[in-house]
Image (tube, rainbow, N blue to C red):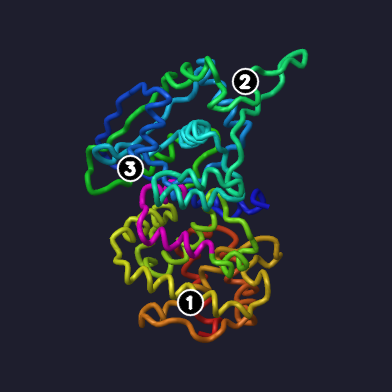
Amino acid sequence: MIEEENKWFLDEEEQDDLQIDEYDITSSPNDFNVMTIYSFIESGAIKIPGFQRNYVWDIKRASKLIESLILGLPVPQLFIYEQGRNSFLVIDGQQRLMSIYYFIKQRFPRKEKRSEIRAIFNESNGISDRLLNDDEYFQKFNLVLPTGLNDKKNKFHGKNYATLDDFKTQFDLRPLRNIIIKQNSPIDDDSSMYEIFNRLNSGGANLKPQEIRASMYHSYFYEMLQILNKDVRWRKMLSLEVIDLNMKDVEILLRAFAMLIYFEKYGSSMSKFLNQFSKEMKNIDREKVNYLKDLFESFLSASTSLPEKTFNSRSGNRFNIALFESVFRTICKDKFERKVLIEKPLNADDINKLKNDEIFSTASSEGTAKLTNIKKRFNVAERVLTI
């Protein structure tokens, strides 16, 4: 289901590269051993915040990494961005670092609980022993490794950190190459760092643009998006009970608010537009963010009487972002300007009429990120919807 919904994310034409302005960046290599890395994570010096990315590896993949470290096999280097003194942000290598962290803790996170664990980790820079020992959230982290030739059992299979015996010290002292990156200039513009994130994560299980965005532009506004993303009414509207590990659902929320608040700043790049909006929202005060939360919740309340999959495409097989953001912006625009909430229920017939409008449909099927097509969609929505 998640694979099918990959179409939610920005179309390929919208995933445009950003032009990098001139900037000054330094990078320096270091070799920290496993226990030093673990200590950095525990102290909060190296941040692996929940808003950056969910942990997505399964126990087999994590076990192979641990085995490689025990045996001294080469593993990919880590990239870490220096935000300030004793403050580092993981650019590339979070899955490896979290695998090490969980292995030393001797607990492995259950897939269905990772969003909750992510939020807890972010708030406390770690996970309490009480939560680690809760079998609802974690299972034992015993290595799961494949059987060798002639059905010979791997000698590390079933081992955990406490039972490594003579190999424990070997594992603890194993060095990991890391590259620490620092942007020296421009000081007030971190747009180039977005591209660095993007390029460093060009292989393997790529970070999606929204994961990168959430790492760079974390704010009270982004925390609010995470709260809204868990609202059962929003999950029902998306027809997805489980929160998406790659933040596709959060990006839809971000995009809706950006179109409502920041549309006059839209140029020709959806990625750049969402980056600029995210950066702008870092400075908004909490009272305004709380109003946006109340506004969206009033939109959800006004949508409760709508039939299921109202915001899906005409074929009904996937959520239609263009339709949703057009309805959201049109319904909320006047309310936002007057700083009031939505009181009347949404009209399902109006939304279906908009969905089936040929001009709207054409502007939603090709070149969806083009300014001219976005304006066409919004103009039709303002004409069709009863506000």
Pointer 2 and pointer 1: residues touching (CB < 8 Å)?
no
Q: Which residue shows up at 44% across the image and 81% down it?
A: 341
Q: Mark 3 falls on what kind of element?
A: helix
* Residue farthest toward the right in the current orientation of the protein: 150
- Discs 2/1, front: 2
Q: What element carries label 2?
A: loop
Instruction: Identify the residue at horizontal 46%, vertical 37% (top origin).
Output: 94
Label 2 amino acid? Answer: Phe
Label located before the other in sequence (2 or 3): 2
Which amino acid lies under the numbered mark 3 shown in the image of this protein?
Answer: Ser
According to the picture, the residue beneath numbered tag 1 turns out to be 330
Q: Which residues lie in the magenta part?
A: 210-230
Q: Which of 253 and 16 is in front in this view?
A: 253
- Confirm whether the magenta stretch covers residue 60: no
Between marks 2 and 3, how big is the CA–CA gap? Answer: 43 Å
Does 111 appear above or below 317? above
Q: Distance between the residues labelled 2 and 1?
A: 59 Å
- Mark 3 or mark 1: which comes first in sequence? 3
How many discs mark residues in the rendered view?
Answer: 3
* Image position of 366 (left or right of 289): right
Q: For mark 2, what is the residue?
A: 156
CA neighbours of label 3 inside 10 A, class few (<14), some (14 to 19), many (20+): many
Check if mark 3's residue and mark 1's residue have beta carbons within 8 Å. no
Residue 192, numbered circle = 3
- Residue 23's x, y, as percent? 26, 38
Q: Which of marks 2 and 1 is nearer the N terminus?
A: 2
The alpha-carbon separation of the residues under discs 3 and 1 comes to: 33 Å
Three-letter code, disc 1: Thr
